[in-house]
Amino acid sequence: MNLMEPILHHYDSSPFSEKVRVAMGIKRISWRSVLIPNMMPKPDYLPLTGGYRRTPSMQIGAEIWCDSALILRELERRFPEPSLYPEGSDGMTDALGFWADRSFFMVAVQLIFGSIGHSVSQAFIDDRAQMSGTRFDVARMRAAVPVMREQYRAHLNLVDRQLLDGRPFLAGAVPGMLDLHPWHVVWFLRQVCPEEAGLIDRFARIRAWEARMAAMGHGQRREIAARDALALAAMETPETLPSGDPDEPNGLRPGMKVEVAPDDYGRDLVTGDLLVINAEEIALLRRDPALGEVVVHFPRAGYVVLPR
């Protein structure tokens, strides 16, 4: 096994994992796949992340990147060609990720589970309630389906308008990050709730774009066992060096003991020694009894850092 080959910890129906998988396809990356459960418990996953339960994460050696936003940026850094930013403007392109991952995605979640919630297991409902910190109210979502259809269509229209001039992809002639942001939300509805996919089918330009995105594939994927990924983390030494930021507004600096968590849902705290802190990234050095030292990376936007 190539020790520097990315390992994606994911499950096949995970929309945020699909976002990363298609990025692998665009870049024609060879990668390893570790399939994890879609709900707790995740006994072979949490030792790597230190308690972060969301999907996916990417592992290279003894380093783990959490959240698709940061995973995509790390893939761009390590595999710069072809670029996910073919037209430049990467800052504002990434800002659109917040629209897709939060506003558009949450409309899709309510539409999907309002439509199929009656067939979802109670274990899954309980797991998502625990992850969100609120009641996973299928009856409320069912009642909101008409409104969510309107909202999903309105968000789709924003994508469709970008394709009005006949361009094949959202930034122009080639695919990139601008396509990946809404792709997983469209894919999620199509795959999980086909009875509502008529909302997509009414947009001919989006249907054609959808086919082009699907044709990107997922790169070269090979399955490995979770125990092999854990063994690799235990065998390797992290490469990330301490790095602070003189403009850090709250005085956080490498060496401090901190806790990190998302600011929206899945707010499980990950504890470690602050290793990297800047406007884009947080990295923690953790010491696991079985794995030894691992470094866990998070995006700065959308995550909170709390001194212990």
Image (cartoon, helix red, strand yellow):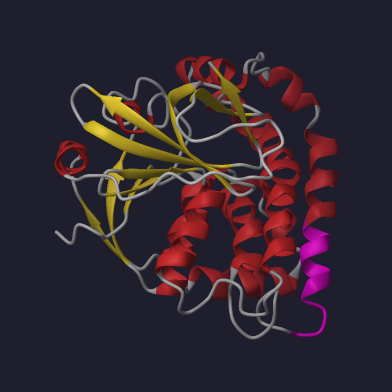
State the residue in front, 303 or 25: 303
| Residue at the image point whose x is 53% and y is 76% from the top | 83
Q: Which residues are magenta?
A: 156-166
| Residue at the image point whose x is 34% and y is 27% from the top | 46
Question: On the rendered structure, is 135 left or right of 235?
Answer: right
Task: Say which quarter of the image contains residue 63.
Answer: top left
Residue 191 visible somewhere in the drawing: no
| Residue at the image point whose x is 62% and y is 48% from the top | 189
Task: Say which quarter of the image contains residue 295.
Answer: top left
Above or below, comparing residue 261 to residue 63 in the picture? above
Above or below, comparing residue 133 to residue 220 in the picture? above
Q: Magenta includes 232?
A: no
Above or below, comparing residue 58 to residue 89 in the picture? above
Residue 48 visible somewhere in the drawing: yes
- Residue 42, image x, y percentages: 33, 25
Q: Quadrant of the N terminus?
A: bottom left
The secondary structure making up most of the magenta span is: helix
Above or below, comparing residue 133 to residue 70 in the picture? above
State the residue in front, 26 or 110: 26
- Residue 119, image x, y percentages: 53, 26
- Residue 194, image x, y percentages: 59, 49
State the residue in front, 287 or 181: 287
Question: On the rendered structure, is 64 left or right of 202?
Answer: left
